[in-house]
Image: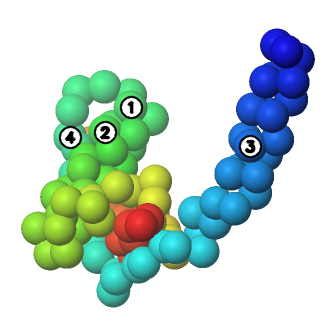
Amino acid sequence: MHSRFLAAATMLALVVAGSILPADAAKVCKDAVSAKARSAAQVSDTSREKRARDNAIDNWSNRARDTYGYTYKFWWRAEDKKVECGGGASAKHCTVSAKPCRVY
């Protein structure tokens, strides 16, 4: 009896898993959003650039949320991501751009 229940539960799980659409099939994206950040922290160049990049992505997230709503604020869901960083020895700056997306 237990093995029949397990087999039925396994079959049901496979049917349900097969009927779910992939996340990209239900993705809705908006126009690209851009944001910038700068870091002049007294740390290594690598750390300064990482801070500038992370802050630019945080700024992008806030701008995407304010423009399109909470469900569009997630950088990891965005498409066409672009990250450009530069600067000298005393400060680094980064500009990020991406199309905010949400999944139904």
Q: Earlier in the sequence, mark 4 or mark 1?
A: 4
Q: Is residue 99 above or below residue 74?
A: below
Whether residue 103 can be seen here: yes
Q: Is residue 4 above or below residue 92?
A: above
Tell me the crowding category of disc 1: few under 14, some 14 to 19, or many 20 or more residues within 10 angstroms, Cα based.
some
Q: Is residue 52 above or below residue 60?
A: above
Q: Is residue 22 left or right of residue 28?
A: right
Q: Provide the secondary structure element on which disc 2 rests.
A: helix
Q: Dot 3 corresponds to which residue?
A: 12
Q: CA distance from mark 2 to mark 1?
A: 6 Å
Residue placed at 14% from the left, 75% from the top?
A: 67
Q: Earlier in the sequence, mark 3 or mark 2?
A: 3
Q: Provide the secondary structure element on which disc 1 rests.
A: helix
Checking the image for residue 101, the label placed there is none
* Quarter of the rendering occupied by the N terminus: top right
Q: Nearer the viewer, mark 4 or mark 3?
A: 3
* Disc 3 residue type (three-letter): Leu
What kind of colouring is applied to the model shown?
rainbow
Q: Provide the secondary structure element on which disc 4 rests.
A: loop
User: Image quadrant of residue 40?
Assistant: top left
So how many labels did they put on this image? 4
Q: CA distance from mark 2 to mark 4?
A: 9 Å
Q: Dot 2 corresponds to which residue?
A: 51
Checking the image for residue 47, the label placed there is 1
Q: Dot 4 corresponds to which residue?
A: 40
Residue contact between numbered discs 4 and 3, judged by CB atoms under 8 Å: no
* Residue at far front of view: 1
